[in-house]
Image (cartoon, grey):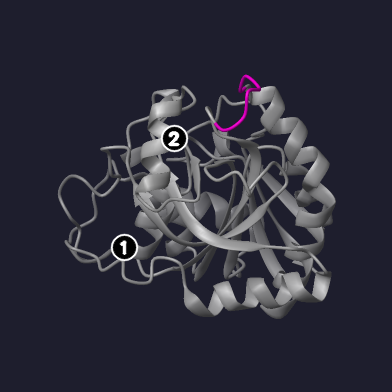
Amino acid sequence: MSENPSDPIPRAVAAVQARFGAAFPKTVLVLGSGLGRFADKLSGARKMSYADIPGFARSTVAGHSGTLIAGNVGETPLAVMAGRIHIYEGHPPQAIATPIRILRKLGVERLILTNASGGLKPDMPAGTLMIVSDHINFSGVNPLIGPNDDSIGPRFPDMSDAYDPALRALLADAAREAGVAVRSGVYLYTLGPNFETPAEVRMFASLGADAVGMSTVPECLVARHCGMKVAALSLVTNLAAGISDTPLTHEETLAAADSAYERVESLLLRFIAKLA
């Protein structure tokens, strides 16, 4: 396919390489709500605002700083996206595709996603960590809609193993070594920004979902389309509406993420070490 002068990807790749060098890490970790301080674990870190990268939209949500950071965690080169964008902020679905495709052009092979979610079962209260085994896209939107560029990926990408089995096994091993309890389950994606109604929560549970949230799935779809391996870790920050009598707020989400942070950090540090 001939180069499109309006395509931001070549300009973005040049800008990122000018800041970080040609050897960009092969693994990128996307930090969800309340988990941004994990970026402090990187040694020799360099930072770049999303605003300085062509094609990177800016996040407007509290707890998402909007910074690309690259460095090392122990012996493992790692890049971190401190903050993500969400379609509910008013971004078109394709705005999520561009950053992921930029990362792929930079040589990224693995995308590790984290998120905050609502638990759909009474035995998955706030603080539960869940390795995502599969997902349900209940949003009605998809960042792959539109003309397909066959040089990026196939028109109809297979999602049989959306979340890489080997990476999921490494996450489970890391959790055991860290002494951190984890569950495995299905994440259901809704568009948001409202929290779900009790009737919706009952329906989602009946569909086989274990947790519900407003992110992760669009990034997974784009990453798998362009050949990346994906893993996802979901932190349940509250029981969903109708299961708990407590009104749901984003402040509650951030507080619960802060409370569980040390366990998340311990698990991620061991997991990243296994990728060295």
Position above or below: 228 against 242: below
Figure quadrant of residue 253:
top right
Element on which disc 1 rests:
helix
Q: Which amino acid does label 1 sit on?
A: His
Position above or below: 167 against 219: below
Figure quadrant of residue 49:
top right
* Res. 225 mark: 1
Name the dominant secondary structure of the magenta segment: loop
Mark 1 or 2, closer to the camera? 2
Q: What residue type is labelled 2?
A: Val
Q: Going 46% across and 34% down the picture, which residue do you hit?
A: 86
Q: Going 55% across and 30% down the picture, which residue do you hit?
A: 59
Position above or below: 193 against 124: above
Q: Can residue 227 be seen in this view?
A: yes
Figure quadrant of residue 1:
bottom left
Of residue 49 and residue 94, the one placed in the foreground of this image is 94
Q: In the rendered structure, which disc, 1 or 2, sits on the residue that comes first in sequence?
A: 2
Residue 215, percent from left and from top: 48, 42
Magenta segment: does it hold 10? Answer: no
Residue 247, percent from left and from top: 62, 19
Residue 257, percent from left and from top: 73, 40
* Res. 201 mark: 2
Q: Give the range drawn in magenta.
A: 243-248
Residue 264 as seen in the image, left or right of residue 62: right
Residue 223 as seen in the image, left or right of residue 238: left
Q: In which quarter of the image is the C terminus?
A: bottom right
Neighbour class for label 2 at 10 Å: few (<14), some, many (≥20)? many
Neighbour class for label 1 at 10 Å: few (<14), some, many (≥20)? many
Q: Going 68% across and 64% down the picture, which residue do you hit?
A: 78
